[in-house]
Image (tube, coloured by chain):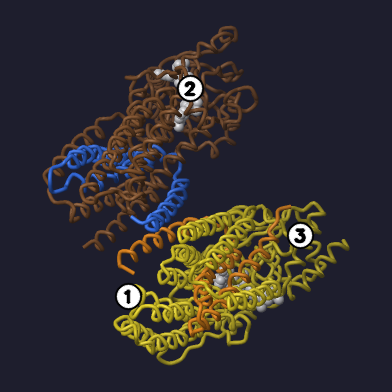
Chain colours: A blue, B orange, C yellow, D brown
Amino acid sequence: MEILDLLMLVYVFVLAIFVGFELITKVPPTLHTPLMSGSNAISGITIVGALLSAGAEEFTLSTILGLAALIFATINVVGGYLVTDRMLKMFKKK
Amino acid sequence: MEILDLLMLVYVFVLAIFVGFELITKVPPTLHTPLMSGSNAISGITIVGALLSAGAEEFTLSTILGLAALIFATINVVGGYLVTDRMLKMFKKK
Amino acid sequence: MQIVSYLIYLIASVLFIFGIKKLGSPKTARQGNMLSSLGMFLAVVVTLLDQRVLTFEYIIIGIVVGSAIGSVMALKVPMTGMPQMVGLLNGFGGGASALVAFAEFYHLSDVHSALDIPTSVTVVLSIIIGSVTFTGSLIAFGKLQEIVTGKVVKYPLQNPINVLLFLVSVAAGVFFVIDPAQIDMLFLIAGISLVLGVLLVLPIGGADMPVAISLLNSYSGIAASMTGFVLNNNMLIIAGALVGASGIILTIIMCKGMNRSLMNVVLGGWETAGGTGAAAGGDKAQKPVKSVDPEEAAMLFDSAQNVVIVPGYGMAVAQAQHAVRELANVLEKKGINVRFAIHPVAGRMPGHMNVLLAEAQVSYDKLYALEDINDDFNNVDVAFIVGANDVVNPAARHDKNSPIYGMPILNVDYSKTVVVNKRSLNVGYAGIDNELFYGDNTLMYFGDAKDAITKLVNEIKGL
Amino acid sequence: MQIVSYLIYLIASVLFIFGIKKLGSPKTARQGNMLSSLGMFLAVVVTLLDQRVLTFEYIIIGIVVGSAIGSVMALKVPMTGMPQMVGLLNGFGGGASALVAFAEFYHLSDVHSALDIPTSVTVVLSIIIGSVTFTGSLIAFGKLQEIVTGKVVKYPLQNPINVLLFLVSVAAGVFFVIDPAQIDMLFLIAGISLVLGVLLVLPIGGADMPVAISLLNSYSGIAASMTGFVLNNNMLIIAGALVGASGIILTIIMCKGMNRSLMNVVLGGWETAGGTGAAAGGDKAQKPVKSVDPEEAAMLFDSAQNVVIVPGYGMAVAQAQHAVRELANVLEKKGINVRFAIHPVAGRMPGHMNVLLAEAQVSYDKLYALEDINDDFNNVDVAFIVGANDVVNPAARHDKNSPIYGMPILNVDYSKTVVVNKRSLNVGYAGIDNELFYGDNTLMYFGDAKDAITKLVNEIKGL
Ligand SMILES: NC(=O)c1ccc[n+]([C@@H]2O[C@H](COP(=O)([O-])OP(=O)(O)OC[C@H]3O[C@@H](n4cnc5c(N)ncnc54)[C@H](OP(=O)(O)O)[C@@H]3O)[C@@H](O)[C@H]2O)c1
Ligand SMILES: NC(=O)c1ccc[n+]([C@@H]2O[C@H](COP(=O)([O-])OP(=O)(O)OC[C@H]3O[C@@H](n4cnc5c(N)ncnc54)[C@H](OP(=O)(O)O)[C@@H]3O)[C@@H](O)[C@H]2O)c1
């Protein structure tokens, strides 16, 4: 990877921080707990990295690490989205 | 330019649109006229492209076009920021 | 070296973002504009250090000439001329984008034999958008400055011709992308786009120009982004995207406020828009209105506790903002509570009234937005309408056949007395009659806003 | 092919953004969460089509096992256990990031001879952040679940040791970047970081855990972004940045609400925090309090017009949300106006009370935020405090020496009568006495919230 390519990624990072900041300051306190668990589920996005490592052709150390990472990340993703949905299902106006 | 590099730029574009959208919807109606002229000044950023073209070593068609572009863009930038500042200077609370 | 300039471009982008963020409050807005211009300054300085920049003579000429013209324009324009000014500056920005794309094309074809596909596509798009923005903005400027007719211009086969021109330029673009040596295609595209800019804006009514300008502003942002794609420069893309978003959002706000679709505006829908209202003149004479002279009006104000002033386009036309401010001062000295109610689309561009009143040094915390004051008109003794019309038309609330039905209006008719200052019973922007003028609690105070209010102030002072 | 997957990654990123955007309102929040999970699904599917993925057996095992564990956890956890749950999930996320960085290192060093500098830097950062997040979150979970001591743990040279460990891991990181063949360095870094995670969270008081968890959540987002840098994948960077921003903002909100600096929390500042408050017990006995029994309380409620219920951490401990909802129902049936006042840091995590009341099916439009109800307490007949303490402590308004001075509180003491339900006069989270309990218009209604309110409801029904 070239330093210039890295800088490209830094641009994306900085912009995404801005987007995140603006959107999250708009979430009302009522929804802060689901926000916490929902954004936590998003952080399970490393599942993508885990899939790449766990799916390598030969079974190497990399695969084992990848498998462990995959299990961890899947727990984070599936657990996070489900529990958030469970909470949000309860928010009702009558 | 590779298509993949182009996609990189598309990411930046999409994120910047989101940032712009979130920030601009927060600007109160009071400031909509300065917003219009201030953001117009920012659109003079093509001055960067104009500088690159106008500063080429040999005097070619590209230089002439660049010079014209530079004058136009400078008018946009200088005029835009000055007029916005003139307006904003007037917004006072007493 | 390139790394440093990339980093500084990043800083400039962040400054643009913060600049717009700080425009979110009148307190920080000026600082925001300065941050944004600092970003621009950094961007220019870094670019001058780029290895591609070898001679500085033309650059100095360009910057000096451009800055001189820009400064003079910025310092000379009267506040009432803001819509035109933004339109004109915008045109220059669009023009610059198109020129840069051309220059870049020449430069690249000197260096490489052929352009690759993404580059040639973005060159074509830059030229199309930049050229349309350029001539379109000039026409918009001309209309507002009354150099070009403000009327809705219609000609046979209008839309088919525009579509045809557009398709031809797209086709030419495709040819160019397939064979980037065909420079004629670029000229063809530019020519057609310049014509298209004229044809697209000409049909739009003069009073609809701010919408067109805001839309073109959005285009010029997108044109800057396209240039960013050509030059592979993130900062241009970000800055352009911010402007693009800003233009489109303001356009939507205006259309919503006018209760019309963008299509309707762009296709020159309302032929009556901005007209003198001869159409609605028919039954006007029949209905009786009550009118007051300066003395009677002064007495009315004098006995009020709570006054709300509602400015509209007429205040801008008459340049009456200073007189209005004088009125507010005089009333406040008498212990009367004076507030201003600002409708989101009063005047001819978003925030128009706010800028004028700021110029006349009215403190911005006396300016109330529609939703903040509308429930309070019941408690208002005198609502004073200065050159506003559509934004206080009660038909919007109940008359399903009215073209402005559904548009939110200021409920001035709920106050105890309404005093309306305008020159006649003529219609406003939407070209429709206003039942408010015939209301039981309405008094018309005819005259040019500036004159009439100056007289009123003198009367009140004399009491 | 790669173009398609880049595009779909872009779509997934946009879905995450929209998902969080829609969390801005309770009406669209659920849909937002679904959009976000759809984004995740797309990301997974596209990755499976990547040319690097060649065998699916381990993937299937991983997904099945992970999904099973995740679903069971998500469906079994009681609503009161949310803080722990988030902490635990968060730890898994951090662990996964560190493991991926390792795996990627092995993979890359199989393919190329040496890693380039940006890659090795990001590998090191991923491992540090991921490992700290992993063990830190596990300790936080343990503290909340009361497996690990909830006390503020202090040991000699605490900060020097942490700084030293951190410097050692940075030094090891530098060595690794200089010579990426030194795999031992990576193990050293991982080991130290795992220890550091434990040492950093252990000193923090149990009641401060939500702040720690939120901060670690932010770290795990940043870890995901780092992984994105390693894999050169924008989507990971974007998703990670969103999470990073979310975590840090929630952390700041909590610190502001508690009127403490982040440093103070992280360094385990308040030793008394979450304690039983023996310290403040001294002069408590002297001052007289008035207390009521269920019957008297019921009569009070019965004669009220306007009731505001203020829930706090005690409601969560007692799981009294259903009883509270029952109370509101009974009162409403009698024509009494019942509202809930929710302090921003009531309970132990942001939005804690809202989730519990939502679970008990209280409509969210009956829940008022501090700024929306605070001016109205003058008109309230009975303010009923259920297991809240610090968030209604008037000392925050006037006692400059109080640790919570300056923190915004609910002005319940302005209502005609205040009824406080808790088990004793013990202190709450901040470990300070509450003068509200001794106020003239305050009545204490002692007892566990669930029991006490159930009794109250029965009495009211019997009236
Ligand atoms: N603000 C925006 O962003 C924007 C953009 C595009 C369109 N618009 C449209 O513009 C309209 C704005 O409403 P508005 O109520 O402000 O204006 P309006 O409805 O256009 O009415 C303006 C009134 O001012 C009077 N006037 C003109 N010159 C005057 C003078 N010298 N002294 C006193 N009065 C004078 C005119 O009546 P006389 O001729 O009888 O004096 C006219 O009826 C809306 O329909 C809106 O949709 C707004
Ligand atoms: N929400 C957040 O994000 C967050 C995060 C970190 C820290 N905090 C802090 O947490 C505190 C929250 O304030 P708060 O007023 O909600 O809670 P609090 O001040 O901690 O007080 C809770 C009270 O509930 C009572 N209680 C405990 N169990 C009970 C039961 N079973 N039945 C009835 N009452 C019971 C306790 O008194 P008895 O023992 O006498 O019953 C205690 O005084 C603030 O200081 C805030 O800064 C909040």
Q: Circle 1 sits on which residue? A: C116
Residue drawn at x 35%, y 38% is A37
Q: Is residue C197 visible?
A: yes
Q: Circle 3 sits on which residue? A: C328
Amino acid, disc 2: Tyr
Which quadrant does ligand 1 occupy?
bottom right
Q: Is disc 1 surrounded by few (<14), some (14 to 19) or many (20+) residues within 10 Å?
A: some
Q: In this view, does D88 lie above or below D42?
A: above
Q: Is disc 2 surrounded by few (<14), some (14 to 19) or many (20+) residues within 10 Å?
A: many
Mark 2 residue's CB less than 8 Å from ligand 2: yes
Amino acid, disc 1: Asp
Q: In this view, does C327 lie to the left or right of C31?
A: right
Q: Circle 2 sits on which residue? A: D429
Q: In this view, does D145 lie to the left or right of C417?
A: left
- Tell which residue pokes out farthest to the right in this image: C462
Between residues C279 and C408, which one lies in front from this camera angle?
A: C408
Gap between marks 2 and 1 measured at Cα: 65 Å
